[in-house]
Image (spheres, grey):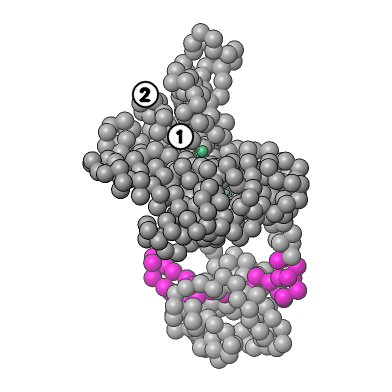
Amino acid sequence: MSILDAELAELVFEHMRGVIIVDTDARVIYINKQWADIIGIDRDESIGKPVKEVLPNTKMDLIVQTGKPMNSDLFELNGKVYVCKRVPLYQDGKLIGAFSYEIFENMKIANEFIKMINQMSDELNYYRSEMRKIRGANYSINNIKGESKAIKRLRQQIYDASASNSTVLIQGETGTGKELVAHAIHDLSQRSINNLIKLNCAAIPTELIESELFGYEEGAFTGAKKGGKKGKFELAHMGSLFLDEICEIPTQAQAKLLRVIQEREVDRVGGFKSIPVDVRIIAATNRDIERMVEEKKFREDLYYRINVIQIVVPPLRSRKEDIGPISRSIIENLNRTLNMRIKGISDKAVRMLQHYDWPGNVRELHNVIERAMNGARYNDVLDEGHFEDFKDKYLSSSLTNIGKTLERGPQPLENIRNQAEREAIVAALNLFDHNKSKAAKYLHISRPLLYQKMNRLGIKL
Ligand SMILES: Nc1ncnc2c1ncn2[C@@H]1O[C@H](COP(=O)(O)OP(=O)(O)OP(=O)(O)O)[C@@H](O)[C@H]1O
Ligand SMILES: [Mg+2]
């Protein structure tokens, strides 16, 4: 029986609540007995009447006008609230009417249902976070600190990527937080209850990479384990595979990787059958992968397969307003591991840190903070004074421009010395938040001499 028998359909409708069907003119075609009784109308008489006449505050007329459903809407009748669903009826793509029925008899039942769903969702979140600890995603989006526009955009991109199943390519300089991003994407995704498996392609000898990724069968090569071994793809089945430093993957393995992504099945080394896998790939690199593609060092077809969702993590120097919040979060974490109670970092110290360009990005900031904490007392607030090493480093990094000046061609030593002096003074002033006494002391000159030099070299604050 392909078409539902009318009698059977009617029987089903009588077992539902609040059923009403209208045609495209919003006239009643059908109303079930239970609903007619509640409204208090004669069923037969209501057939053919405009639905608004039968039920003045119904929205069924809107459904046939717009052709769009209302999935759960409140409907009030005689002081009682019903939760109903209204759907347009299409036949062969043409709108022929609309249909409505009750989902919940009253708000009390609806509320109980919502309460139950909320409770289940709380439980789910709890188990998710427990699973996360077991499954390997150590970071969540909450670990990505910062309030700059760039970092907010990054967090939005992470949310978008987590809702999709496509391959992600994370690019960014060293220490910008690519690993953090990869973990956060997995953690927010549907796959978070399954494994996040990580492979650092740079850390594995070329001859082992294929067996690591795809696994091997017993006897595949000398030294192969008895019973064979699962590869990372199999381990990541239903979860995510994080391929860190993807650019380091050897050419031969690139071809195989492409095949796995396209066919969604792996062939173990020395194996005879393909094993289907459902894995979401998240790749990361700090190298210029586009250039490697141009230079034929990275397969172009693989690049396109991987670069479906592209996330670029911006360097710290382009979002220096994040230095404060990130430093504070690093201090909190280090307080735990170093067993200290550092209360924070002064605004002046943050401003000082903001003058530096951070080629090592957040990882370098982490090291600088850790060194400062090691020199601090148990419950200090970190201040400029705690960053002596950093000051030297900063000063020498800002003096590297002299080299560039020399590259421009021969010039009098006098000019070069002036430039070196200017740079050193500006850097020292920045370092101490424009405090001239401290800058002078740092450069081992008197305050008047500093003024004199600033005048001569045209340094204005
Ligand atoms: N926005 C951020 N907030 C807090 N901590 C961060 C942030 N970004 C990075 N970090 C921290 O900085 C360090 C370096 O991050 P991560 O290891 O993710 O860098 P990466 O981009 O993978 O670097 P590499 O290319 O060298 O592997 C980690 O300790 C990480 O926790
Ligand atoms: Mg990394």
Q: Amino acid at mark 1?
A: Glu
Residue reaching furthest left?
Answer: 409
Task: Give whichever of 306, 19 is nearer the camera.
Answer: 306
Three-letter code, disc 2: Gln
| 37 with respect to 461 (left or right) | right
Q: Dividing the picture into quarters, in which one does residue 286 lie? A: top left
> What residue is shown at x 56% (from left), y 57% (from top)?
437
- 408 vs 441, left or right, is left
Q: Quadrant of the C terminus?
A: bottom left
According to the picture, the residue beneath numbered tag 1 turns out to be 245
Identified at 54% across, 73% down, the residue is: 70
Q: Is residue 93 magenta?
A: yes
Q: Is residue 304 magenta?
A: no
CA gap between label 1 and label 2 equals: 16 Å
Q: Alpha-carbon neighbours of circle 2 within 10 Å: few (<14), some, or many (≥20)?
A: few
Image coords of residue 44 (percent x, y) = 59, 85
Label 2, secondary structure: give it. helix
Q: Is mark 1 within 8 Å of ligand 1?
A: yes
Q: Is residue 71 above or below residue 174?
A: below
Query: What residue sits right under mark 2 in the picture?
Result: 252
Report the span colored magenta.
88-114
In the depicted structure, whether residue 53 falls above or below residue 267: below
